[in-house]
Image (cartoon, grey):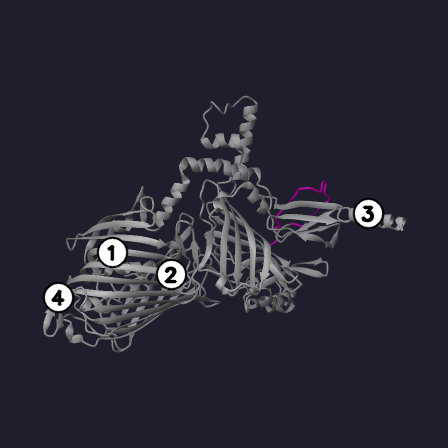
Amino acid sequence: MKFSFLSFLFVLLSTLNIYGQYKINGKIIDAETKENLAFANVTFNNNNKRGVITDIDGKFFYESNKPIKSITISYLGYKTLKLKPDTNKNLIIALKPSLESLDEVVITNAENPALRIIRQVIANKEINNPLKKGGFSYTSYNKSIIDKQGRQEKSDSLRQVFLNQIKKGELDPENDTLSGFEKTLIREGNFNIMLFESVTKRKFLPPDLSEETVVATRVSGFKNPYFAVLATELQPFGFYEDNISLMDLHFLNPIAKGSIKRYDYTLEEEIPRGNDTIFNISFYPKKEANIDGLKGFMYINSDGYAIQNIVAEPYDELITHLKIQQKYKRVEEKHWFPEQLNFEITTQQGIFINGKSYLKEIKFSDSLKSKDFSEVQLKYADNAPKRDEDFWNQYRIDSLSQTDKNTYKVVDSIGERLKLDKVFDVATTMSDGYIPWGKFNIPFNRFFGYNRHEGFRLGAGLETNDKLIENFVFGGYTAYGFKDSEWKFGAKARYNIDKSEDMFLQFNYNNDVREIGRSSIHKQNFSGNGDLRRFIASRMDLVEHFQLEFGRRNFKYLTWRIALRNEWIRPQFNYAFVNNLNNIANFRNSEAVLNLRYAFRERIVETPKKRISLGTKYPVFNLRYTKGFDSFLDGAFNYQKIEASLSQSFFTRNFGQTRYHVQAGYIDSDIPLGLLFTGEGSNDDDIPIVMPDTFQTMLPYEFLSDQYVHLFLTHDLGSLLFKTKDFNPGLILHHNMGWGDLEHPQSHNWNFNTKEEIFIESGLEVTKILKLNYLDAFYAGIGAGGFYRYGFYSFDKSSDNFVFKLNVTFTLN
């Protein structure tokens, strides 16, 4: 018995000692650029079944019970390399690019072996899509650097020259004239321009409920960094959606349904691994396929025909280069799930951002419910910027390199000297329209304005901020119009009761002009070129306005405001309201106003300083109800007024971006012109710019209504119909319709029309006819469009129905 036990123990220990006693690790890089090569295939001892694939950092690790005598490395676009390692630790293996081009491989669909595999991948998309697996959670360590290509190598060479000169006594760094950078380089060594680190915990519930908490954040040069972004804003989480969105650009996924007709695929390599086979398949758009496509390669595992690794970048050259890399693994022996994510952004000046995310603690959960999620998709833990090194070392994949340590040391000292935290606070405040000045903010949008009534308008304003009294704002402004020669002024007092619930109480006083017929629900839908609509405003009321308003957020996605106001209204044009044979020009108006806005699944980013909305892919509903009182605070009119709008923008594969905006309004009583509905037109000879959600061929105040329905349809085809290497104009289709009525037209001593019939116009815009390169960062595109008015309200002369307009766009392509 004793002998048998000792024998068993000896055999067991011998087995444990033999198994895995041979280990090897290293990194695969590009021989020319020194870039890490993600997903290179590494095999050992001439046995294709024994090997590994490098991770997104180009690293590999392998252990064997046999001596490792040879290594073979293959990678798409590079020469295969076979070598005998002289060491088994921290190998650095450089591959040389191959001169062969993928375009030289021509395989017809009938004989292409890659198509069988791609069809299997497409058939299993829903099964393998991590966003459709049910609830899950994970912890992510994220690291990004900003630097300039080639700077590191030049700096290393320069430092070595300095060190050699110091050693020979040819240079005295303390006394000789050197720049601050050169002295830092000698003293500390090389460093990056910027380094970002964060640890986040995320939970998700299909189809799109997500909540991410930043539990740790660190950025070189900053003490309180609050500029983490949602990872999904930079690259998709998973590569299974039909459209891959990168930096607001949409690309057809090479494994989308129908992609086989638009992509070419090449089976580059078959890699046996245990009982499975990994297929390395390259892809790029067919020459005749006019699509926004991707190029790259993917590793498909025969276990479920799931993506194991993928590298993809836009096929067409952009002004800013984008590239993503993703690595998946089997989790809980059930699902393929992202394990490592990487994105690269490189500008034409050579400035690059490289960001990596490493996922761990991945758990699938059937217990997550929608009530477990708030409207905030990204938020910060209170102590996120205060984490110590012990905490960070729990999550870092590797300890910080010397360059990383130098980056923190050098850039932190620069940040303290330049007060970068303060600079960032100033930039944040300016993004909200204010210039910070100690305990006050100066609203710079008050400085200058223009409209047809006032002409040029100059003004100034001042508001308090939290440095004076936290959560309270007191402010005022004044302005002068050079055409109407009138001073305007106003004041406000606001108490932010609870910023986490968008709850506030505010009092406003204004004595200012207001365009007739255009309510807040109309103005808040304007964005981009729509802001130009205010320049052509010419019919104004001068309004002395008192208002008390309360607002907050409820039920995650509903924001509401209720207000009580009293106004003294004086039309600034030749108009009189006829009431019981009396002509009324000036009048007092008292109202209670309820505003509702419901944006389902609106994505909110919350920092200690502010809340930012990233919008929603679902329809946004607005409702505004107004009750006028004729017996309260000397109000002259008793009426009810209601307006509602519904708008949405969505992208359709192979079809483009569609947007619709529907708006309707109704008033139940006879009231003055300034309170009715008008101003929906934007046809102006002096400012021929396309203005969204307006009628492009209609004069600004051509029609007057007390009830109306408007529909604005826009479809952006992008460059789907026509594209060459140097010329890729976009096409935008428009179709707008409107109906309105006025029950008491005789009450208004003013020249106007009513639209009891359907008003119809259609248009076509061509964008990016001329592209201007702006600082090698993006293109400013200038285009033109034509709109035609037809149907009941068309003019007899055909040319009078046509309106020519210009457009401006900003893009990466």
Q: Is residue 418 magenta?
A: no
Q: Could you classify mark 2 by the number of other residues whose Cα lies within 10 Å: few (under 14), some (14-19), or many (20 or more)?
A: many
* Residue at the image point whose x is 53% and y is 28% from the top: 162
In the picture, the disc for residue 553 is 2
* Residue 8 drawn at (x, y percent): 85, 50
Q: Residue under label 1, please give it.
A: 508
The CA distance from mark 3 to mark 1 is 84 Å
Q: Residue under label 4, please give it.
A: 585
Secondary element at image label 2: strand
Q: Residue under label 3, please give it.
A: 14
| Quadrant of residue 306 within the rendered picture | bottom right
Amino acid type, residue under disc 4 in the picture = Ala
The CA distance from mark 2 to mark 1 is 21 Å
Q: Could you classify mark 1 by the number of other residues whose Cα lies within 10 Å: few (under 14), some (14-19), or many (20 or more)?
A: some
Q: Could you classify mark 3 by the number of other residues whose Cα lies within 10 Å: few (under 14), some (14-19), or many (20 or more)?
A: few
The answer to the question of whether label 3 and label 1 lie on touching residues, with beta carbons closer than 8 A, is: no
> In screen coordinates, is 450 left or right of 497?
left
* Residue 588 drawn at (x, y percent): 16, 64
Relative to the observer, which residue lies in front, 510 or 457? 510
- Mark positioned earlier in the residue sequence (3 or 1): 3
Secondary element at image label 3: helix
Magenta residues (range): 79-101
